[in-house]
Image: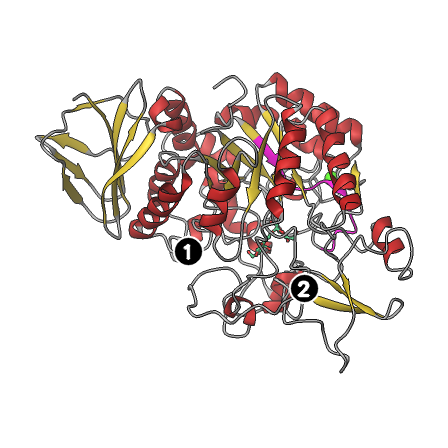
Amino acid sequence: KQGSDWWRGAVIYQIYPRSFMDSNGDGIGDLKGVTEKMPYIASLGVDAIWLSPFFTSPMKDFGYDVSDYCDVDPIFGQLEDFDELIEHAHKHNIKVIIDQVLNHSSDQHPWFKESRSSRDNDKADWYVWADAKTDGTVPNNWLSVFGGPAWHWDSRRRQYYLHNFLDSQPDLNFHNPDVVDALLDSVRFWLERGVDGFRLDTANYFFHDLELRDNPPKQEIVEGSIGVSLDNPYGYQLHLYDKSRPENIAFLKRLRALLDEYPGTTTVGEVGCDFSLKTMAEYTQGTDKLHMCYSFDLLTHDSTMTHIHKTMSTIEEGLGTGWPCWSMSNHDVERVASRWNHGKANPAKSKVFMAMLLSLRGSVCLYQGEELGLPEAELTFEQLVDPFGINFWPEFKGRDGCRTPFPWTNDSKGGFSTIENTWLPVSEAHLPLAVNVQQGDRHSVLHAYRDFLHFRKHHPALIDGDIEFLFSDDDVLVFTRTHKEESLIVGINSGEQAHFTAPLSYEVRNIVMPEGLKIGEYENHKMILPANSVYIGKIVS
Ligand code: TEU
Ligand code: CA
């Protein structure tokens, strides 16, 4: 799809640069590595890449703690390497989306160093500072996503500062217009360098309640949602006052106005925590805020088609002119091949879930390795480096298992690096699924992805057609996608053999389906779906 709305229905391939390709043999992936692998990325048939942060950082949260918004961390290379990456991507017709972590900076950012130095310096109000209560305790009951209170005592200022994540990730104060100006300047810096868009980290966390009111307890716990565990009170609080504040809308409008100066650019906001479907709809409504948002609904919950149906219906109801982006895997959650298959890779199911994701209404983010059907890597406690995982072990194993090096080849180092001692170990279980192995196997998950992405490009209904659901149970989902040029019926079956009888008004014709999938049949208004199969047909009347 060409033109300035290329992002509507686009497929975005997420790269975690630390783990994609190491070009200089230090055991850590880098920007030159990404550039080197551009032909592979292009061979998948995706429209864009999203690069997780590569900015200057002390790496306490592996780059989501930025200490210079306008430079590249030496681990990943330098600005020239980024320019080269963009140039190569564009040559291959691939757009480049970069991550912007605006909500918080690193505590090593010069802004924070100055802010914490006294109560009356120029940047004294650039972060969220608050006095202790009279008994010395924290200002209110807000909690950090990574565990414990969201407040950290600073002995120099003798005040607390707010951090939604690590205490080395202080929240910037968006109520201060100078902060907003400075952040928008850094966004402009990358627009000037030619990026095609931004993934906005924690897009609904930017503002906090100025009265610092306590969050109320939650009436109902949604199982599977972020931060819900017996030891972690985070999920037992309704995040009314620290997330999704109404003031954010005006900020998103300013950000959009800036992007509109650079036609063809886009945004995809990460929306987490409570009311995320409602917030996604609100943020993407009209043409003056974000272009797209994603929530965690397909990232952390169970895989039943009933759940998918419910999530999609909810978003469709409230969405209006808004536009969602869906993903099943990313650098924050257990890989889908494990999460939805009880821990084990299952190529047949990976293909079915792939076809489902790429047929729903919305843009799609695929996470590196998803196209190989990689399962979550198993790591011991000693091997963990993610502070989130270390904090919550063993109940929650953290995010290292989805961040291990990408398996390019099936030799012991996986073709990722020239050294053995990579920043996280290459998973042995990934070697039989390496790119070189799947390349040579016509029935591999990798080929199925390529074929489906190619097929999808020729079916405008799958890219931005309307959606209507006809049926769902735990395993089966049937829906239609309708576009002015074509109308399709899609049947997905992730369980044992099943069938679905369509309303008599549907006349359906078979079309050539992508290879590598188990294909269902359609005859006399009956869709027959063998175990782990997909059917897509053309509705002719
Ligand atoms: O994630 C925000 C977020 O909600 C996650 O922290 C999520 O709750 C957690 O990873 C559980 O799966 C973004 C980034 O995607 C994440 O990598 C960063 O650590 C975080 O922001 C802080 O910048
Ligand atoms: Ca390297």
What colour scheme has been applied to the protein in the rendered image? secondary structure
Picture coordinates of residue 163, whole percent (x, y): 70, 60
Is residue 54 toward the left or the right of residue 141 in the image? right
Q: Tag 1: Cα neighbours inside 10 Å, few (<14), some, or many (≥20)?
A: some
**Looking at the picture, does residue 316 appear above or below residue 174?**
above
Between tags 1 and 2, which lies in front? 2
Foreground of the two, 72 or 124? 124
The amino acid beneath tag 1 is His
Q: Name the residue under label 2.
A: 211
One can see residue 408 in this view:
no
Is residue 442 toward the left or the right of residue 166 in the image? left
Q: Name the residue under label 1.
A: 301
Tag 2 or tag 1, which sits nearer the N-term? Answer: 2
Viewport quadrant of the C terminus: top left
Is residue 389 toward the left or the right of residue 193 in the image? left
Residue 107, quarter of the rendered image = bottom right
Read off the magenta span: 49-60
Picture coordinates of residue 9, whole percent (x, y): 45, 29
Is residue 175 toward the left or the right of residue 525 in the image? right
**Looking at the picture, does residue 141 appear above or below residue 420?**
below
Q: Which element carries disc 2, helix, strand or loop?
A: loop
Q: Tag 2: Cα neighbours inside 10 Å, few (<14), some, or many (≥20)?
A: few
